[in-house]
Image (cartoon, helix red, strand yellow):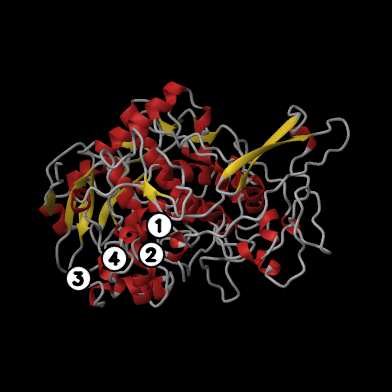
Amino acid sequence: MNLLPVITLVLIVFPLCTFCQFPAICNTPENLQTKTCCPNNCGGPTRGSCDNFTEVVRAQWEASNFTITNILRNAPNEPQKGTADARYLWPTVVFENVCNCSNNFGGYDCGECDFGWTGSNCDTRKPQVVRRHFNSLTQTEKDNFVNATRELKNEMGIWSVIVGEPSTYTSGTVTLQNVSTYNFFIFLHNFIARDGTQACQKVNKDNIVDFAHSGPSFPVWHRRYMLTVEKEFQRIMGNDTFGFPYWQWEENDMSPFTPEYFGVPANGFSPNAVNVSGSLVNPQDWNTICDLSYWNSNLNCSDYWRPCNPADDLALARPVQRGGGSSYLPNTVEVMISLAAPSYDASNLNGDFIRDGPRTSFRSRLEGWNKICSAVNCVGGMDVDQQHMHNNVHVWVGGQMDVVPAAVNDPIFNLHHCNVDRIFESWLKQYATVSFPNSELLPAYAPITGGHPGHNRGDYIVPFLPLVTAGKQYAIAEEWGYTYDSLIPANIDDDMITDCDVVAPGNNCPICDANNTCIDCTNQTCPVLIVAPIDSLVSDILVTYGLGFGLGFGIPLFIAIGIIIAMAVTIIKSKSRGKAQSQSYEMSVKT
């Protein structure tokens, strides 16, 4: 096995990344000493300028949550940490002067067009790429996609990452390492969530330090991440029309989990995790990085907090694992319940934006922190404490997917988050469309200030270059050059939904039988719910829902629909689902 070289201050020159953490051309002693990364003069006055972002970034952080800001500021003085944190005042710990691209130009040197634009002046809308569900791809398309995933796992010479941080914010050096493209994806997600262990939360006095989860930026951070991933797949495939496929888990689709695609088993079907096997993901060809928190959860915070070292991790030849997680996947009704949330995010009674926000928060429902009530979750206390939606899919897969800092090691992560982005898009399209894309039509992005750094509307999303704010990323997919083959209808009203907290043991919500959908447990009855308007069903005589049952096995149930008269759709729900056996995804971010 060839180990990756670790380079301090100076990196060997290699082809440059466009939307990345650190372009290689800036990794020289002069650039690092002057804290300047403005290659090619940022394209000249018509494309961009080399700007100092120190004051802008400092103002953002001063308007953010003081406790989180102080934790990062004091990292060099914390015995469990002991060095500066490169995420603090991003990106100024490494570079204070970076390119500020004009209009629709993009890239670290403003040398390319931003997502969704094309042309010599980046003033022409790029034709929309279509993201389709994995099972709709042809055999050739699936093979090409899997082969591209393999190539990106092995491809070197594009990306570099921080593996060592300065001793203080005023002295010390940055250590950088060349990594493969797919391993950069893993590192990126680990870098912003590395504090998400019990040991580090104890050091942080139970505060969650995470730049992409448990807060308002969750949907927009992962939207930016998926755009970056998709662009790299387009590059390696030589096909700028490629749209990243999604895993349609709400329909209980198991098609990605075969030996020739993303490996077996899907989730282990046992209390214990097992190695994944297949032509792509297997212990011989696909080794993990940045997953110490998965293999050993009993170390000190300092072991998890420092940036991971991909070269050292690859030398251990650790496998991707799955299993030991939840026994069911979220279904279509639960997705619709999430879409019913009226606000993008919302604060609690103290005015704070926290992980498990109020029931009005779409972000909290989508991420999976709201214990919203759908049929099976109304039957008793067994399901009340389980995670939901996005979180529960991680738990269902298990293995590294069940631990936030390690999750991207399993390539199913990207298909999962493509579907999460599709649900986000389904929510956005209730308010803004291609014909009316004005972001002012959307519910306001919140908060403006006072939240976790990187989560506020005007904050730069950590750790992307070129810099982009959370507020700018909050826009419909067409603004970024892509769309989906289908969206999920938002046909459940929020006033029909009851929080599961109301349905705790001892309360009077009845056990719903298989012929009712328990959304609003009013007067001890489970009303039949119409989940789609007539006009959307005229062409569909039968509607199939893949509803989770037992250990994730789906039972497609055909529901006859009357076309001429007013229609009611009865969604047959599964029996009570077992409590998740593994809670590591929750524990890794638990307050």
Does residue 472 show up? no
Q: Amino acid at mark 1?
A: Val
**CA gap, disc 3 and disc 2:** 22 Å
Left or right: where 502 falls relative to 437:
right
Q: Report the residue marked by disc 2.
A: 196
* Residue at the right extreme of this rendering: 565
Q: Report the residue marked by disc 1.
A: 404
Tell me which numbered mark, 4 or 1, is placed earlier along the sequence: 4
Q: Amino acid at mark 2?
A: Gly
429 is higher (above) or lower (below) than 273: above
Q: Secondary structure at mark 4?
A: helix
148 is higher (above) or lower (below) than 445: above
Tell which of 400 and 178 is nearer to you. Answer: 400
Tell me which numbered mark, 3 or 2, is placed earlier along the sequence: 3
**CA gap, disc 1 and disc 2:** 7 Å
Q: Give the percent coordinates (x, y) of residue 377.
A: 66, 58
Question: In which quadrant of the rendered view does residue 348 lie?
Answer: bottom right
**CA gap, disc 4 and disc 1:** 13 Å
Cβ atoms at labels 1 and 2 below 8 Å apart: yes
What number is the disc on residue 572? none
Question: In which quadrant of the rendered view does residue 518 lie?
Answer: bottom right
Q: Secondary structure at mark 2?
A: loop
Q: Report the residue marked by disc 3.
A: 168
Q: Amino acid at mark 4?
A: Trp
**CA gap, disc 2 and disc 4:** 9 Å
Tell me which numbered mark, 3 or 4, is placed earlier along the sequence: 3
